[in-house]
Image: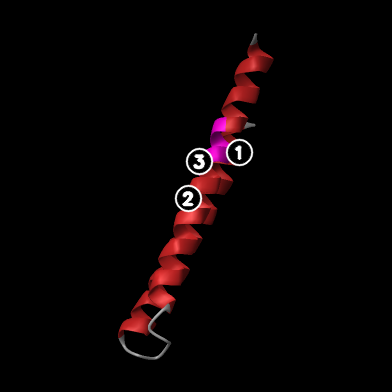
């Protein structure tokens, strides 16, 4: 279960990084508003923290099942 969750979290983070990198590049070239960069980085940070918390919870659950 932990490896499957880890795989999905990695896929989600990779997809988020790609999307927000594209948004940041578009913002640099003034295609989008200036504050998009900050919002993208903030969103990526929130997704990262949520992913870490999810992985910790799943690891704790797996450890309790093994005992």
Is most of the magenta stretch helix, strand or loop? helix
The residue under label 1 is 4
The residue under label 2 is 48
**Crowd class of label 2 (few under 14; some 14 to 19; many from 20; radius 10 Å):** some
Cα–Cα gap, marks 2 and 1: 17 Å
Front residue of 31/2: it is 31
Cα–Cα gap, marks 1 and 3: 14 Å
Is residue 53 covered in magenta?
A: yes
Quadrant of image for the C terminus: top right
Query: Residue at point 48% right, 50% down?
Result: 48
Q: Are marks 2 and 3 in contact (CB under 8 Å)?
A: yes
Query: Residue at point 64% right, 13% down?
Result: 66
Which residue appears farthest toward the bottom when viewing the image? 31
Front residue of 11/55: it is 55
The residue under label 3 is 52
- The residues colored magenta run 52-56
* 59 in relation to 30, above or below: above
Q: Is residue 47 left or right of residue 20?
A: right
């Amino acid at each position: 279960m932990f490896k499957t969750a880890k795989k999905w979290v990695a896929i989600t983070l990779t997809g988020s990084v790609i999307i927000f990198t594209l948004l940041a590049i578009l913002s640099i070239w003034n295609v989008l508003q200036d504050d998009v960069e900050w919002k993208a980085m903030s969103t990526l940070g929130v997704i990262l923290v949520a992913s870490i918390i999810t992985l910790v919870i799943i690891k704790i659950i797996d450890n309790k099942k093994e005992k």
